Amino acid sequence: TWHGRNARWGSTWASFSAVIGGANVGARVLRNGKEDEWTSILSSMAMGAFWARNEGPAGMARGAIMYGGIVLLFNGGLGGSRRSNRSNRGMPTQEEEQAYADL
């Protein structure tokens, strides 16, 4: 019984990791490589829709709104922080990198 349970848990974690990674990369590709808070929000919305796929289109929409809304709130809301994830980690933003390159 232990092996069966561990195999199910491993499968669940593998699918969880694949959805997170795939949604993040997909959102970045759709946004031409731009990585900011909207990329996080869009990838979270895709994850929410994926996890609710068994509940039909209405459930997928609810999941997308819930997951995207949570990340939006953590990022400071619509009018909140305009800083990208890179600058929050102490890394220069894309605009700052471009300004340094122009010097």
Image (spheres, rainbow, N blue to C red):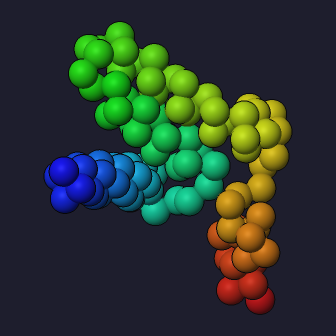
Outermost residue on the right side: it is: 80
Q: Residue at x 43, y 32 (%)?
A: 48
Which of the 4 image quadrants contains residue 84?
bottom right
For residue 27, above or below residue 61? below
Q: Residue at x 46, y 62 (%)?
A: 33
Q: Nearer the viewer, residue 103 or 30?
A: 30
Q: Can you give x and y, in whole percent of width and height, for residue 66 in the image?
A: 54, 25
Q: Nearer the viewer, residue 6 or 21?
A: 6
Q: Can you give x and y, in whole percent of width and height, for residue 101 in the image?
A: 68, 86
73 horizontally vs 7: left or right: right
Q: Residue at x 80, y 34 (%)?
A: 79
91 horizontally vs 28: left or right: right
Q: Nearer the viewer, residue 37 or 96?
A: 37
Q: Can you give x and y, in whole percent of width and height, for residue 58 in the image?
A: 35, 10
Q: Can you give x and y, in whole percent of width and height, for residue 37 in the image?
A: 64, 49
Residue 30 visible in the picture: no
Q: Nearer the viewer, residue 40 or 13?
A: 13
For residue 88, above or below residue 63? below
54 horizontally vs 103: left or right: left
Residue 8 visible in the picture: yes
